[in-house]
Amino acid sequence: MGNPDLWFADTPADLERAKALCTGCPVRRQCLAAALERAEPWGVWGGEIFERGAIVSRKRPRGRPRKVAA
């Protein structure tokens, strides 16, 4: 499906695009189950983002969070 680097991107926006592409995939469940079994270290598998072998809801951008003005 297109550029394989998208499934291992650094930016949250690209990872969300990869997740969206997984939505209609006929092997999505099998892909996710296999990734969980292997404890994939990173990337998008079965429509989920993996980091250090676990599913994360979203990837945060690098760097420090912006300060909120008081």
Image (cartoon, rainbow, N blue to C red):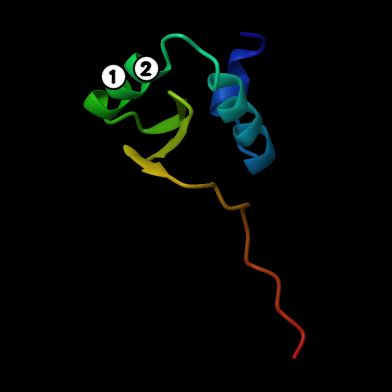
| Position of the N terminus by quadrant | top right
Q: Which residue is rendered at x = 77% and y = 85% of the image?
A: 69
Mark 1, residues whose alpha carbon is within 10 Å: few (<14), some, or many (≥20)?
Answer: some
The image's mark for residue 34 is: 1
Q: Is residue 15 left or right of residue 30?
A: right
- Badge 1 vs badge 2, beta-carbon distance below 8 Å: yes
| Residue where numbered disc 2 is placed | 31
Residue at point 62% right, 23% down? 6
* The C terminus - image quarter: bottom right
Q: Tell me which residue sits at (43%, 33%) in the image.
A: 42
Vertical comparison of 21 with 59: above or below: above
The image quadrant of residue 22 is top right
Residue 14 at what x, y percent from top left?
67, 33
Give above or below for 26 relative to 52. above
The local crowd at label 2, few if under 14, some if 14 to 19, many if 20 or more residues have their Cα within 10 Å, is some
Residue 32 appearing in the image: yes
Q: Residue furthest bottom?
A: 70
Q: Quadrant of residue 17?
A: top right
Q: Give the CA distance from mark 1 to mark 2.
A: 5 Å
Residue farthest to the left? 37
In the image, residue 31 above or below residue 42: above
Circle 2 SS class: helix
Secondary structure beneath dot 1 equals helix
Q: Is residue 52 visible?
A: no
Q: Is residue 1 above or below residue 16?
A: above
The location of residue 16, given as percent across then percent down, is 62, 35
